[in-house]
């Protein structure tokens, strides 16, 4: 959580672009990474991340602090943005159609070549999971959100999130051992 986040949110709700800019700077890399692991190209990830923050800015006056981090709200918007992206394209990315550029997104996140190869393999495995499982794994282990925060972002109970996580980990083990 960003220091002074609640104050920044209150000021952003009143239209203070500088305060929203600080929130943007703090959360952009997380939201971008979340989206980049779900779409085929870096350009799509950049466009979708931009749309997330554009929508957040437009809807700031209606944002209500509910005891959850601001990031939970941003992840909700990001999830819907990715779903809408695929709905508009009217195609679901198949594993075979994954481009080299999509695989390189994970590699650019990590400078170490060995680690990037492992990240690429894990990314391919994650793409084999269903959408909810992908979201839980990314939010929990990439962005280190709590079960409570994930439940809020996904509009599910904490128990449901834990079950999805358990099943996703079990499925990932099977995929990675194959």
Image: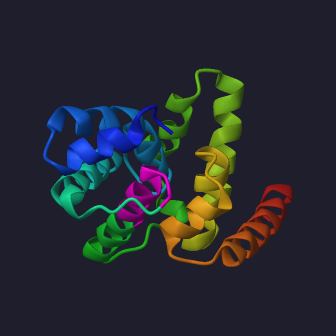
Q: Position of residue 31 (x, y in %)?
A: 42, 47
Q: Position of residue 176 (x, y in %)?
A: 80, 56
Q: Residue at x 32, y 64 (%)?
A: 81
Q: Which residues are magenta?
A: 67-79
**Location of residue 17 with respect to 59 vertically, above or below:** above
Q: Nearer the viewer, residue 36 or 139?
A: 139
Majority secondary structure of magenta residues: helix
Q: Residue at x 30, y 32 (%)?
A: 22
Q: Quadrant of the C terminus?
A: bottom right
**Location of residue 8 with respect to 131 vertically, above or below:** above
Q: Is residue 54 left or right of residue 70?
A: left
Q: Is residue 165 magenta?
A: no
Q: Nearer the viewer, residue 42 or 66?
A: 66
Q: Look at the image and name its color scheme.
A: rainbow
Q: Nearer the viewer, residue 175 or 17?
A: 17
Q: Is residue 99 visible?
A: no
Q: Position of residue 114 (x, y in %)?
A: 71, 26
**Location of residue 169 with respect to 145 vertically, above or below:** below
Q: Residue at x 64, y 46 (%)?
A: 144
Q: Position of residue 95 (x, y in %)?
A: 55, 63
Q: Residue at x 40, y 44 (%)?
A: 32
Q: Is residue 15 visible?
A: yes
Quarter holding residue 116: top right
Q: Nearer the viewer, residue 107 or 53?
A: 53
**Location of residue 112 with respect to 19 vertically, above or below:** above
């Amino acid at each position: 959580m960003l220091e002074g986040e609640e104050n920044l949110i209150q000021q952003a709700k009143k239209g203070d672009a500088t305060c929203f800019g600080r929130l943007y700077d703090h959360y952009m890399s997380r939201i971008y990474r979340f989206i980049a692991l779900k779409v085929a190209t870096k350009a799509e990830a950049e466009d979708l991340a931009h749309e997330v923050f554009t929508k957040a800015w437009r809807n700031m006056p209606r944002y209500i602090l509910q005891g959850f981090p601001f990031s939970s709200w941003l992840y909700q918007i990001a999830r819907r943005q990715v779903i809408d992206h695929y709905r508009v394209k009217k195609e679901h990315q198949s594993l075979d159609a994954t481009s080299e550029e999509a695989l390189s997104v994970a590699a650019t996140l990590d400078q170490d070549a060995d680690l990037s190869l492992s990240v690429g393999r894990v990314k391919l495995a994650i793409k084999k999971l269903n959408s909810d499982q992908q979201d839980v794994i990314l939010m929990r282990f990439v962005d280190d959100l709590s079960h409570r925060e994930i439940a809020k972002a996904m509009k599910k109970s904490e128990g449901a999130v834990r079950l999805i996580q358990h099943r996703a980990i079990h499925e990932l083990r099977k995929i990675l051992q194959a």
